[in-house]
Amino acid sequence: MQTIELTQRIQTRQEMWLELEGRLDEIQTLVPDELRKGRADRLREGVLNIYSSSYPYFESEKVGIAIDFAVKNHNSVRESGYPYVVHPLQVGHILAATGTDTITIDGGILHDLIEDNCEKRIEMMNEIYRLFGRDVLTLVNALTADPMEDKALKKSLLVEKIIKSSAGDNKKRQYAIKVADRVANLLSLNYLSSKDSISSADRTAITIKDTEENILPLARKVDRIYQPELRLYSYTKELLRRAKSGDAGTFKS
């Protein structure tokens, strides 16, 4: 009987993961399409509807402002060819699905803005403070890597910075955003380009190592804090299994 119940729980969790990935795919399709058509309002409403499908209890007006701000200020393109803003909007959805609060979702949507606009860092920080307040600015600043650090060291150093710099609600919010960021990045590993100075295989190896050493412990903490039904620790381990095996599709119980 216990074996049957365990199998059912695993199957239910895997269905949740598949549903999450379906929603993230929707964001990946919707965002570039609406950007091409110049329909910022439709983009914002579409993303909010996707978020609400998983967790309808955040403050949609505030999150909508964060979506607009991210779309306006992320102008780069990822190695996949998709607009960079797809990534932080996917991070926001993972946070909504985890059941975090509006401040955390806003922080996730905005988490790469300072790093992506380093030439106007102070201006960007002032705007985030004006529009979203001290808590969100503190989150974004804590999640911003030092642009002078070597790329291969940034990930682990950033986790160390998060652990040392935060306390209370901000600590749990930073943990959640960092884990959601890594989940989104693990899902996009197939799109890594070999044109970068670090080869795709090396990038994948670095990401796997850092996830095992630094992100999995944070994922366990996030599960204890928020108790999400999709279980980020188990999901991150599943994504690691896929990354190691090259299996982008099926689950292993």
Image (cartoon, rainbow, N blue to C red):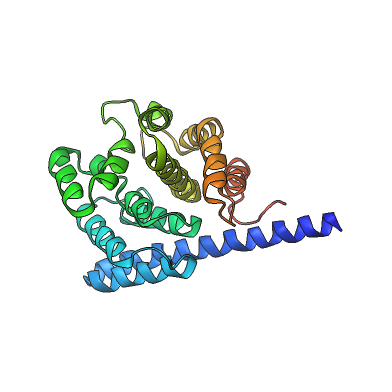
Q: Residue furthest right?
A: 1
Q: Say above or below: 11 vs 49.
A: above
In front of the other: 38 or 115: 115
Across and down, in percent, residue 150 comes to: 34, 25
Which image quarter: residue 155?
top left
Q: Farthest residue in the front direction?
A: 168
Rendered residue at 34%/38% (across/down): 143
Judged left or right of residue 185, residue 136 is left
Residue at 19% over, 38% down: 118
Residue shown at 53% from the left, 31% from the top? 209
How many numbered discs? 0
Image quadrant in which the N terminus is located? bottom right
Residue 187 x, y percent position in the rendering: 50, 51
Seen in the picture, residue 249 relative to 35 is either above or below; the reply is above
Horizontally, is 90 left or right of 224 in the view? left
Q: Nearer the viewer, residue 18 or 52?
A: 52
Closer to us: 199 or 88: 88
Q: Position of residue 123 (x, y in %)?
A: 12, 43
Task: Using the image, determine if residue 165 lies above or below residue 238.
Answer: above
Using residue 154 as the reference point, say whether residue 124 is left or right of it.
left
- Residue 128: percent from left, percent from top: 20, 49
